Image: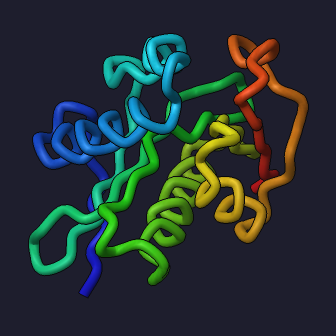
Amino acid sequence: MLQLTRTEPNNPDFINLIKQLDAYLAITDGEEHAFYNQYNKTDQLAHVIVAYENQEPVSCGAMKEFDADAVEIKRMYTIPSYRGIGVAGKVLKGLESWAQELGYQRCVLETGKRQTEALAFYPRRGYKIIPNYGQYALMQNSVCFEKVL
């Protein structure tokens, strides 16, 4: 049975999942990986969820404050053998619920055009494409999303 655990960015299981995510992104982002990677440091995160199946970490996600009424969803990752069965959706829902508990009204996020799974995943969960924000404004590979909670 899948268990979602709220934790902090120094959680060893989260760190291990993030290493797998970064290895994947280094391939898909190619030459732009260094640019994107600078905005994915875990020291900026305060709220992390790790999903466990039979005590094994299989998925994660995190969030940080974006502005007074929004959080930015970061570091979403599911190991390949657990993709397509709803695990990432449960992690995302857990983050959204946590954001609401903290008083936030929106979630925003950025993903890359080469992350085709992500481009299909977020719209199915109510996220709408918005103009690229902040550091992603001029990045041709970036796609930004928002969901009102």
**Picture quarter containing residue 82?**
bottom left
Which residue occupies 56% across, 52% down? Answer: 101
Residue 28, given in percent of the width and then of the height, sits at 49, 38
Which residue occupies 42% across, 72% down? Answer: 83
**Picture quarter containing residue 138?**
top right
**Picture quarter containing residue 15?**
top left
Which residue occupies 45% across, 83% down? Answer: 85
Quarter of the figure with the N terminus: bottom left
Residue 89, given in percent of the width and then of the height, sits at 53, 70
Residue 92, given in percent of the width and then of the height, sits at 53, 60
Residue 137, given in percent of the width and then of the height, sits at 80, 16
Q: Is residue 103 above or below residue 9?
A: below
Q: Nearer the viewer, residue 118 or 45?
A: 118
Which residue occupies 37% across, 19% down? Answer: 41
Q: Left or right: 26 with respect to 134? A: left
Q: Left or right: 4 with respect to 135? A: left
Quarter of the figure with the C terminus: bottom right
Outermost residue toward the bottom in this view: 1
